Image (cartoon, coloured by chain):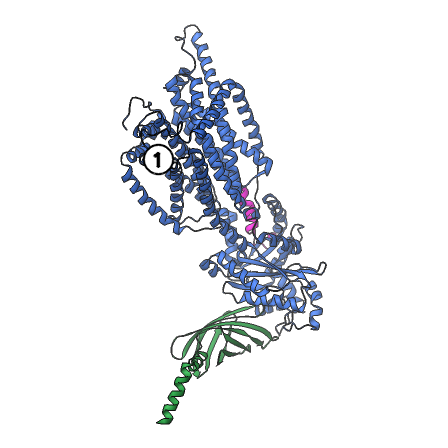
Chain colours: A green, B blue
Amino acid sequence: MMISLAIVLVHLMLASHGFVGVANAATTLDGVWSGSGVVNPSDGARESVRCRVRYKQETATVFGVSATCATRSRKIQQNGTVLKVGPASYVGEFYNPGYDISGRVRVVVRGATQTVTFKSARGNGSVSLRKQ
Amino acid sequence: MKRDKASPSRTRLYRCAEPILALGDVTARFPKLALMAFLLLSGVMAGGLFRVVADDALDEFLQAPTADYRAFEALRESFPASDLDAYLAVDGSNLLSAEHLWQMQEVAFELLLLDSVDSVVSMFSLREPLTSKRLPAPIIPDDLASGNAKLESLGRKLDHHPLAQGRLISSEVDGNRLALFLVALNRASVKEHGLPSVVRELEASVARSISGSDLRVGLSGMPLMKAEVIDSTRRDIIVFNGIGILVGVIILALFFRQWQLVVIAIAPALFAVLWTLGLMGWARVPVDPLMSAIMPLVLVVTLNNAMHFLFATCRSIDAGASRRTAIDRALVEVGPACALTSVTTSVALLSMAFSSSSLIRTFGIMASVSILSALGIVIALMPMLIELFLKDGRSKYLGGGRARVGVRLLDSLAAAIGDFVAKWPKLIALSGVGLTAVFAVAYMQLDPRFRLSDMLPDQGSSAPVLDRIEDRLGGLFPLNVLVQWPDGTSAQSAEVRTAIRDVHHALERHVAISKVNSFYDLQRWAETGGLSPKEASRRLNEAAPQELLSRFINERQRGALVSGYINDLEAKEVLALSQDLEPALDKVREAYPAFTVTLTGLTSLGASRSSAIISQLSLSMLSAVFIVIAVIGLAFGSIAYAGLSAVPNLFALFATGALLFLVQGGLDYATVVGLTVAFGLAVDDTIHVLHRFELEVQRSQNVAVAIHRSICVIGTVLILTTLVLIAGMLVTQISVVPPTRQFGLICVSTLIFALLADLFVLPALVLWASRWIDRSRRAQAMSPGSPKARSHGVRGLSEERGQ
């Protein structure tokens, strides 16, 4: 009982300093994230890419995604959903009719940053995003 | 309407206008109730203010059910991107250094991430020659770290790249280059947020990306210029109506020195402008630079009528009449002239309803309706304001009141003019007629003129940027050729490729065309990697971004766009250039008989349509002149009056035209619309003079006395009103939109010429003509067997009118 009380007290202390709250907020995908990375086309040279991604929670495990990415000369917009598969990881499928590309995306959140990796038959890439 | 013994007899004009004037009788009887009803209606109209929308109207000006406009619409349907291209110019020394490339790269990234931007084409879009397998690497390497060997040869590569040199990057001059970014705006975003808002977002994004850099950046292009026109128009609506009215109020206050008189004089004009804007809001008519000219027009006409009414009423009260009698007298003496002035101005404006331009048709109809509603406001509001604000038996309002200094000054001036005219009627009349003929010759020399950039704000930020781009990269105004192939032909077929190539060469060969863009450029570049034409075409379709290809080829609509770029030329130069190109395009048409090859685009359409519209407007204005003169003749029941009214009105019109000829040598759409409006204003003065003359002739039975008295009575009001209106109109000179400034200047000069013509030429003509008519009648009376001789002057004129 004393150990349980200690655990509760520690938890309360952490909560009063906001640590618990911060930890919860950091793993929340909701909001706008932006950052940069690279894209590696299977038939071309590697190129830098910048992205801005908006997530909106739709259910307990499903998040709507609206992504705008750009190389220095092209713009790609993609909407879709990702499914929460772990405490801080999400996966989804995508198809872009404009470029006729379909593939898989994986999101891993660490605090206020996340890494998005995407793979398709036409290439792969990854971007690191920070919460805005 | 009750009459006292001193009331004047009714003229024919009064009898025509009586149904409208009855409104004034009603409001005079029940002023408080009428005021409440009027304020309620005004509240409803004020609701329309919140629905007013500003627009640039550049496209609508040219909109018409003609073959050339239909060709333009076909172009826009197949290639909608071209009218939403903004240009970002970046220049500076050592532009291709790693540091500067990194900064420009940041700009490209930031722009592409905006929701309002669809694509950006720049030197960062350029790639190495296309191969059959791999996607070629960008010309500008991803790694911009200093010392990168690829950067050292970049300048040479760009100078020799077929898609770069002279298009996306200028050659190096004294270490300086200019790079061009074509930023295609998103249509849905523009529609949702409005062009000015999207442009501001663009400007903020560029400023953020390039902050701290020594590079010079500037945005230009059609969207920027249109946004400037919209912003300027919104500002002008507030400024013209605000400052113009304020200026008018100050002058009236200085003159009258009694707040009641200022309020009565200005209130109808304020309400008329409110009702006009409200009407535009409720009717969802966008307010563009042309529509915004309706407000000062309404202000001018309403103030003119209100001042005549106020002066007539105050003179009666000063002479000892009751308020009610004074109002009745004003309704009979001035009301008919006010009605006729509004009707003739409406007729002049309605002549524009026959234009093939939908914008000008809408302007003519809206302006006409606004003038008629303003007439109703004057007739209804003036009697109730006079009943509510003026008092019987008080000290004089004009002659003996605080306004006596100004009134005496103007009365003295008017009397002096009357004396001068009475002394030299023949000389003044002949001079007036002679000058009218001379001015008419100058007017006829005016050629239609149109330059697209003349319609755009000249103090905006985009015009200098456009000049910089044109200076380094050549013209930015496209002459578009739409190449369409028949159903069943593939866009990648050899036939389509060679047709596009042939049109491309036809444009390239013309000396006035600085560069040509088409799918042929991409094809040529794609073949530099050693691919065959067919293979290059196939790889282009696989590898090139769709947003780039769609600028040149629309497979679904079976069309290709070939654009030749020219400098900002006058319409007649563009027309001459288009005619020069036709033989070369005819050769292409002969070689590909199943294809349609059409020269079109905003530049070409602007040139062809504007010349037609301006000529049409000029013709309809001259028709309006004759219609108005006929209406005057009918209203007064006198051919002599119609003939006499022609000279001062044509004098004002042609004198302004002669001034235009000296100043700018040509007639553009703003000046011809301004002339039509100004003619309507000039006629107002003539009608008031003629109507007053008719009343005075009835009283005095002597032409000379009647003319002198008319000038003395009307002259004061005309001079004061003209001064107030000129001061208000001069506010238009602070507009940054050239057509608005020109319109204001036309109105000011016509008001001045109209005043001179109606105070000098018209009275002189009446005096001289009455003697001539009388002389011929005396000659008839002296012949054997003729009727008994009659006395000279007035009876001749009266009899000629059939009274």
Residue at the spot x=51%, y=43% of the render? B740
**Quarter-wise, where is residue A81 in the image?**
bottom left
Front residue of B760/B418: it is B418
Direction from residue B412 to residue B475 in the image, left or right? right
Residue A36, picture quadrant: bottom right
**Which chain is mark 1 on?**
B
Frontmost residue, B458 versus B472: B458
Question: Which residue in the protein does label 1 denote?
Answer: B382
> Disc 1 on helix, strand or loop?
helix
- Residue B723 visible in rendering: yes
Count residues near mark 1 (Cα–Cα under 10 Å), then give few for <14, some for 14-19, many for 20+.
Answer: many
Q: Position of residue B402 (x, y in %)?
A: 41, 31
Between B112 and B574, the residue placed more toward the observer is B112
B602 within the magenta span: yes
Q: Is residue B197 magenta?
A: no
Residue B418 at x, y percent in the picture: 48, 22
Amino acid type, label 1:
Met
Q: Residue at x 64, y 73 (%)?
A: B143
Q: Is residue B692 left or right of residue B732?
A: left
Point out the image quarter for the C terminus of chain B.
Answer: top left
Highlighted magenta segment, given as a residue range: B589-612
Report whether B444 appears left or right of B693: right
Please provide percent x and percent y for residue A17.
43, 81
